[in-house]
């Protein structure tokens, strides 16, 4: 190395990771690529990989869901965290009720039985029953409305996926 050349500091990495692995951690639209898995650890890995401001949104959504639905079941499927309820009465509150996913300019929250919620979440879906909430960088989450939707959604029959 030339005595006049400056050495640039290395990008901090987890032991064993490469630059190529770090770049592949986000899919198109800035969605984290996280292995399919059941439980809180998989969802926390997804949230930890959410880029920039989306990370704080993911942490807040997870905290609100956990507070609203104690014992909520979590998983990562199709590179998105899913929340559901196991048990309950016949046809009530069983299956997945909510998921979220990163896009370049917003975090999309999917309520799988969203057309049954009151008021109905604002964004339509191609799926007949699903409704979305888009959370953008400079927007505050209406926590009272969000938790009301989560409570309602968790009490409806969920999706089997």
Image: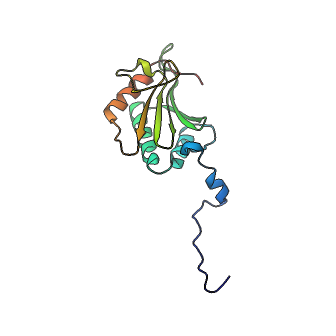
| Residue 17 seen | no
Total labels: the figure holds: 0
Quarter of the image for residue 19 reads bottom right
Q: Give the residue drawn at x 67%, y 59%.
A: 16
Q: Position of residue 115 (x, y in %)?
A: 43, 19
View extreme (bottom): residue: 3
- Indicate whether 7 appears above or below 130: below
- Indicate whether 4 appears above or below 65: below
Q: Position of residue 69 (x, y in %)?
A: 42, 30
Q: Give the residue drawn at x 54%, y 48%.
A: 49
- 50, 96: nearer the viewer: 50
Q: Give the residue drawn at x 45%, y 40%.
A: 106
- Indicate whether 154 appears above or below 32: above
- Indicate whether 42 appears above or below 15: above
- 122, 66: nearer the viewer: 122
Q: Position of residue 72 (x, y in %)?
A: 48, 31
- Left or right of 142 in this view: 51: right
- 84, 125: nearer the viewer: 125
């Amino acid at each position: 190395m030339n005595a006049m050349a400056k050495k640039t500091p290395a990008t901090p990495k987890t032991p064993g990771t490469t630059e190529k692995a770090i770049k592949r951690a986000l899919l198109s639209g800035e969605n984290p690529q996280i292995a399919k898995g059941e439980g809180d650890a998989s969802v926390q890995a997804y949230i930890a990989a959410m880029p920039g401001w989306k990370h704080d949104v993911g942490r807040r959504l997870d905290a609100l869901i956990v507070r609203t639905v104690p014992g909520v079941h979590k998983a990562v499927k199709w590179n998105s965290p899913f929340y559901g309820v196991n048990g309950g009465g016949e046809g009530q509150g069983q299956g997945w009720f909510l998921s979220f996913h990163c896009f370049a300019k917003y975090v999309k929250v999917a309520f799988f039985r969203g057309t049954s919620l009151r008021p109905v979440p604002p964004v339509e879906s191609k799926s007949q029953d699903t409704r979305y909430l888009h959370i953008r960088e400079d927007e505050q989450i209406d926590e009272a409305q969000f938790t009301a939707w989560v409570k309602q959604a968790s009490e409806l029959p969920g999706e089997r996926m």
